[in-house]
């Protein structure tokens, strides 16, 4: 075998470029660059662009920084393509200040460097920042191009900024770029994500050239906004629909339509993949039909359809809803078998499932074993402790979360914490402190659910009048949830006057509810006002209201039943 070595910078650059284009060979590209320099040949601007790309592929920050130093020393920093590549490199490494410094130091920037900065912020999820650069580009002597507009439209889609998206659409028409099908596809997607289906369809019809992405975008826009007839019409008219086309329709029908229709479309799909089946499972789970979800999961397993993270996270949510521990354990074994028990989305679903089945120790074991955790994982474990009445563990884990770098508790975290504080009388004082921390330190505006927790807490402290004032001060006077919470708190402290006010508000906002009359009757009885009790019960009879019987799930082996309605869930399948 002849060992060919390049003789000049062009030959070396061709070799390095070929290796850098293949992500798996990026490390070899950098090795060849070292060999090139050892042979006495210096890189040119295109060589440096290829080397920066290889460093980006590998995520080698130190190597990219060394390249940056060489670029500065050799004077290539004035080359717009080299500088734009550096901006992209720093952006993908999330070194935003370094990227911005490279941009500012460019002697004469062009639209390519602006686009590198804008798209970099877009890809890193900093959508507001990406959009803020577009007006700055407008104020410069440069003109935005199709790449600029597609990035801006994509940011509007992520933020659901419909009016700004329309404004950018007007500029696209002004600059004569509406005929570019890439721009058109982004517009269809943006209008769909902003809920403006008619505009999505109009843009689609006005496009002269359409590709498969155009068709799939308009199908997605229709299906995800509940326009199922339009989605089906586009699917049937599409020249060569692919798996994505069918999956979008299946997902839309599963979310907004009849599950039987979604299953029928699945059976008609030429080559259904795991996403097609996942949409059905998720649809059943979201419609509280765990029995059918488990049945479909079993069929998916028996047909050897590849299962992924979404499959297991969806079915585990259904298992958690009905607290079917046996099924949950079997599915956990499946995740281990497929090597999918450690990803964040599956790990969080397992924690939730075990917590809902009362197996907090198992949930905690999984939480501790996960190699990576995000805020959802922390919230799931904190919620699991709260769900099982372990208030002190809620507080302990919350305090740990506060110390985790790059993570901050959110509104969901505080809801679990506040709920635990009012359910545990010894921690009521912490509830007040955490509520103030949420508002004043983390800047989280309270929701009606947070307000309800505080009302319960105040009710236990005998501060029911203060709780009533808080409802008005927070602007929740037209929210039935908080008035129901206030009525419930009155049941604890026995304040009949506030109870009557709260009951009237609940009836006004939510209509007649047996809960209101039963609780009002109990409070009246606690005050010895038996005449009022008789009147309330007579009023309930006139309105046809009666106290509903409670029910609970119980599982024996793989049979889940509820004592109130006698239903059972019996699914037998060898899924391991």
Image (cartoon, helix red, strand yellow):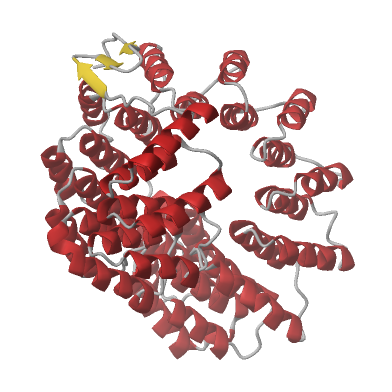
Q: Which residue appears at 38% of the width and 52% of the height?
A: 487
- The picture places residue 512, in percent across and down from the top left corner, at 53, 38
Question: Where the C terminus falls, by quadrant?
Answer: top left
Q: Which residue appears at 56% of the width and 74% of the height?
A: 129
In the picture, measured across the screen, residue 455 lies left or right of residue 270, that is left
- The picture places residue 378, in percent across and down from the top left corner, at 26, 54
- The picture places residue 135, in percent across and down from the top left corner, at 71, 79
Rendered image quadrant of residue 82: bottom right
Q: Is residue 76 visible?
A: no
Q: Which residue appears at 51% of the width and 51% of the height?
A: 504
* Vertical order, 8 against 313 (above or below): below
Question: Where the N terminus falls, by quadrant?
Answer: top left
Rendered image quadrant of residue 433: bottom left
In the picture, measured across the screen, residue 548 lies left or right of residue 188, that is left
Count of residue discs: 0
Q: Nearer the viewer, residue 538 or 411?
A: 538
* Vertical order, 371 against 30 (above or below): above
Q: Which residue appears at 77% of the width and 51% of the height?
A: 184
* Vertical order, 269 against 316 (above or below): above
Q: Nearer the viewer, residue 467 or 95?
A: 467
Rendered image quadrant of residue 563: top left
């Amino acid at each position: 075998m002849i060992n060919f070595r390049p003789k000049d910078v062009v030959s070396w650059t061709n070799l390095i470029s070929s290796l850098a284009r293949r992500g798996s060979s990026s490390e070899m590209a950098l090795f060849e660059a070292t060999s090139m320099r050892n042979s006495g040949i210096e890189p040119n601007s295109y060589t440096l662009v290829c080397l920066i790309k290889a460093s980006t592929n590998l995520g080698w920050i130190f190597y990219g920084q060394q390249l940056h130093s060489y670029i500065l020393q050799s004077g290539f920093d004035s080359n717009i393509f080299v500088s734009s590549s550096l901006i992209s490199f720093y952006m993908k490494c999330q070194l935003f200040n370094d990227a911005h410094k490279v941009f500012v130091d460019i002697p004469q920037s062009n639209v390519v460097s602006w686009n590198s900065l804008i798209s970099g912020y877009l890809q890193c999820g900093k959508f507001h920042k990406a959009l803020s650069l577009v007006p700055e580009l407008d104020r410069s002597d440069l003109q935005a191009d199709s790449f600029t507009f597609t990035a801006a439209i994509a940011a509007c889609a992520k933020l659901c900024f419909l009016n700004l998206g329309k404004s950018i659409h007007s500029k696209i028409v002004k600059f004569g770029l509406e005929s570019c099908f890439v721009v058109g596809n982004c517009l269809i997607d943006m209008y769909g994500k902003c809920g403006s289906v008619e505009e999505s369809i109009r843009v689609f019809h006005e496009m002269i050239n359409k590709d498969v992405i155009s068709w799939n975008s308009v199908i997605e826009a229709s299906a995800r906004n509940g326009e199922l007839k339009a989605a089906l019409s586009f699917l049937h008219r599409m020249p060569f629909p692919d798996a994505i086309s069918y999956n979008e329709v299946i997902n839309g029908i599963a979310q907004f339509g009849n599950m039987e229709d979604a299953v029928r479309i699945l059976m008609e799909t030429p080559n259904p993949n795991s996403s097609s089946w996942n949409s059905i499972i998720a649809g059943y789970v979201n419609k509280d039909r765990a029995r059918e979800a488990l049945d479909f999961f079993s069929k998916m397993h028996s047909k050897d359809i590849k299962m992924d993270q979404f499959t297991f996270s969806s079915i585990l949510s259904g298992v958690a809803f009905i607290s079917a521990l046996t099924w949950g354990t079997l599915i956990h074994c499946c995740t281990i078998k497929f090597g999918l028990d450690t990803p964040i989305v599956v790990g969080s679903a397992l924690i939730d499932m075990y917590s809902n089945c009362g197996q907090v120790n198992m949930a905690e074991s999984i939480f501790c074993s996960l190699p990576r955790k995000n805020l959802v994982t922390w919230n799931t474990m904190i919620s699991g402790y709260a769900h099982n009445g372990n208030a002190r563990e809620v507080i302990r884990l919350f305090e740990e979360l506060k110390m985790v770098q790059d993570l901050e508790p959110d509104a969901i975290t505080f809801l679990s914490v506040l709920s635990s504080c009012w359910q545990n009388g010894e921690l009521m004082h912490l509830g007040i402190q955490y509520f103030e921390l949420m508002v004043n330190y983390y800047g989280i505006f309270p929701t009606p659910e947070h307000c309800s927790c505080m009302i319960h807490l105040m009710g236990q402290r005998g501060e029911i009048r203060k709780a009533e004032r808080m409802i008005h001060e927070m602007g929740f006077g037209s929210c039935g949830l908080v008035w129901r919470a206030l009525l419930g708190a009155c049941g604890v402290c026995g304040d009949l006057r506030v109870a009557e006010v709260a009951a009237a508000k609940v009836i006004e906002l939510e209509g007649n509810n047996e809960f209101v009359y039963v609780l009002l009757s109990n409070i009246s009885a606690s005050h010895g006002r038996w005449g009022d009790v008789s009147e309330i019960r007579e009023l309930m009879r006139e309105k046809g209201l009666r106290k509903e019987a409670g029910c609970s799930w119980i599982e024996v082996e793989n049979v889940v039943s509820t004592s109130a309605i006698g239903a059972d869930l019996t699914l037998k399948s060898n899924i391991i």
